[in-house]
Image (spheres, coloured by chain):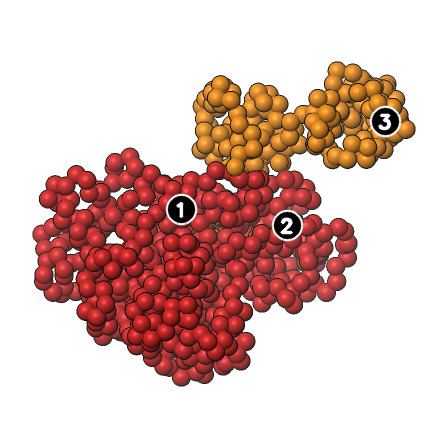
Amino acid sequence: MDIVKLTIDDKTLVVEKGTTLLEAAKTIGINIPSLCYMKLEDLNFENKPGGCRVCVVEVEGRRNLAPACKTVCEEGMKVQTHTVRVVNARRTVMELILSDHPAECLTCAKSGECDLQSVAQKLGIREIHYQGEQSHYKSDKSPAIIRDMDKCIMCRRCETVCNEVQTVGVLSAINRGFEAVVAPAFEMDLDHSTCTYCGQCVAVCPTGALTERDYTWKVIEALVDPTKTVVVQTAPAVRAALGESFGMEPGTLVTGKMVTALRKLGFDYVFDTDFAADLTIMEEGAEILDRLSKHLSGDKEVKLPILTSCCPGWVNFLEHNFADMKDIPSTAKSPQQMFGAIAKSYFAQKLGIKREDMVVVSVMPCLAKKYECTREEFSVNGDPDVNMSISTRELAQLIRNANLDFKQLADEDFDNPMGASTGASVIFGTTGGVIEAAVRTAYELYTKNELKKVDFEELRGMEGIRQATVDFDGLPINIGIAHGLGNARKLLEDIKAGKSTFHAIEIMACPGGCIGGGGQPYHHGNVEVLKKRQKAIYREDAGKAIRKSHENPFIIKLYEEFLGAPLSNLSHELLHTHYFDRKKKIEI
Amino acid sequence: MASVKIPDTKVEELKAICQKFRNDGSELINVLHGAQELFGYLPPEVQEIVADELNVSLAHVYGVVTFYSFFSMLPKGKHPISICMGTACYVRGAEKVLDEFKKLLKVKVGETTPDGKYSLSCLRCVGACGLAPVVTIGERVYGRVAAGDVKKILGEY
Ligand code: SF4
Ligand code: SF4
Ligand code: SF4
Ligand code: FES
């Protein structure tokens, strides 16, 4: 390892060659303010356009101030991070940025979580000495994401994540000078582009320029409507992150408090998407075994690998970019949609109410789910199976609106029957979890033997692409895992080229899986937060009495009372779907 | 849906331009240059083909097209009007002349009138500083133009 020695604020330190001043300073506890820069360690995301100049420092012997995020440490460098000259320069650039930014913090969705706001506070900006025209752009409202480019500071983090991590390539800097902005081609709205609604651009945007479409008020309207029975479902990854919105340590599990809060908010039934995740495993597991045994018996018609289909961001990606492969994913709907379909049939019948009188709300770590529940094939006579989807952040907002002291809430349990779940369903919230859950069930169904050890460490981790071979009592099953759409693309290209040797592949659009979803509390560039959420998910699994989906007693009952068996006609009608060729042609 | 249909032969020519640059994404600017020579402008359909051929995102192509004022997404008018914005022309009032054109034609720089008759653009020094401010319309050159002359000049077309 090559090293260099330098001094920062009169402290001498030694760092690895190639380290930037920003990173080096951090190792000795000096946090140089930064704005455009963001790095997600291990997730292939680094945005350093060096554009904002908030991070400038003084380097002895250099005439100009240097941006710390872009300047590499050199032997013998002497750096000062907060001289009067530096502080003044930072204030000047900050005032210039703010002079073209609407001062709408009071009503901005990002307020309190905005990096621009916090840097302005850190620098103590109290007055803006520059006045000029402010740029205005048309606003863009898709079912999942709102773009308000008046608030864009051109850091280009969104462009980097969409292009380099997701390889979707919807966003690019366009125009020049005063009119420069980040936008889809031809300044189309997102819903005319190939956007997957993964929401990763929202997750990294420092300002209120990119935010989720907010449905909290629609939820409140449903809750106060006396003619409606309002049912809520919560996705696995929500319980591992919601606490952060109330100042709790990342990785704190708040399942019980979340249930209590939802009950206090007035939901008639507090159910769990995990129940539907167990159901997904029943259907998807049966489908995997079906395809696998046909394949093993030499049926050339049967395509392998089978791909998981529970992530709507990934499904969008497939439909836009790999439509010729649209018969490879499992036909199982996502847990959100399975939940809706069962709630508005089985459960509505149990209650003796019409499906139109039931409102299903989902709480998701995800922005793609907002779009998914608007898809036509997921509604019956215009009544959607899931009426609306709110993010983890929006649930936190509802809890604040209701003036609940979240940290002090007692723990309560989900309602039955659609609140019961197993450890297998909880791990849907992290990369590797869906396939591990499927393996736990498929193994027992295939071998007819009991699984001795339910933990498959070989499927876990944060590597972008992972592979493992699981032994089905002598039959080796090759499993692939990809999270982040750029990684998914690599596995898909392999399949296309006929090079893939996997039997089954799990794909999640978001880095880390749903724990890193676009609707989660903001991580502000700290990947440790995602890792802690992942640990929490596995803790929740380990603590569950039942850890295999097919042993969930309420799932067994659902099949006995209603569905019959996995892949039955009714199961097909309610729980399976198909995919469309949506290669976009430009429409402007 | 696509507003302009490009004839197949032109599509082949465009693809040949891409191939000339080995379908290399880093040659995007050169490819767009060639494409603009071929079509006279860069409509969305052309950008889409270029994006597909070079395997770069359409947003990126559009980003480059909108960044360089040299590229245009609008067809040139029958009478392309250019106003020289070189230093000599500028100090002698080219901007006022430009404003007058904008006012009378109701278009911005880089745009074409809805009837397709005129398009308006700016040039850097055309080397006719002795005649500043200079306006060209098609092949014709007008020297020492004042804002008050613009109406008369347009009247000639
Ligand atoms: S939601 Fe995802 S695909 Fe869409 S623009 Fe943002 S990062 Fe790109
Ligand atoms: S939209 Fe947000 S992330 Fe994208 S460039 Fe603007 S401020 Fe940065
Ligand atoms: S990984 Fe999870 S949060 Fe991200 S798009 Fe897919 S389902 Fe949504
Ligand atoms: S953070 Fe370094 S230039 Fe923006």
- Chain B's colour is orange
Label 3 residue SS: helix
How crowded pointer 2 is (Cα within 10 Å; few <14, some 14-19, many 20+) is rated as few
Q: Does the residue tagged 1 have its C-beta within 8 Å of any atom of ligand 1?
A: yes
Q: Are marks 2 and 1 on the same chain?
A: yes
| Three-letter residue code for mark 3 | Val
Q: Are marks 3 and 2 on the same chain?
A: no
Q: Does the residue tagged 3 have its C-beta within 8 Å of any atom of ligand 2?
A: no
Q: Nearer the viewer, residue A255 or B2?
A: B2
| Three-letter residue code for mark 2 | Lys
Q: Nearer the viewer, residue A348 or A55?
A: A348
Residue A485 screen position, x and y as percent: 39, 48
The alpha-carbon separation of the residues under discs 2 and 1 comes to 26 Å
Residue A206 screen position, x and y as percent: 56, 57
Q: Is residue A227 left or right of residue A414?
A: right
Q: Nearer the viewer, residue A254 or A360?
A: A360
Q: Nearer the viewer, residue A270 or A535?
A: A270
Q: Are marks 1 and 3 on the same chain?
A: no
The alpha-carbon separation of the residues under discs 1 and 3 comes to 53 Å
Q: Give the labeled residue for mark 1.
A: A317
Q: Give the labeled residue for mark 2.
A: A138
Q: Give the labeled residue for mark 3.
A: B150
Q: Chain of mark 3?
A: B
The alpha-carbon separation of the residues under discs 3 and 2 comes to 34 Å
> Mark 2 and mark 3 in contact (Cβ < 8 Å)?
no
Marker count (numbered): 3
Label 1 residue SS: helix
Chain with colour red in the figure:
A
Q: Please report the residue visible at 21 percent of the width from the left and 67 percent of the height from the top.
A: A559
Q: Is residue A504 visible?
A: yes
> Mark 1 and mark 2 in contact (Cβ < 8 Å)?
no
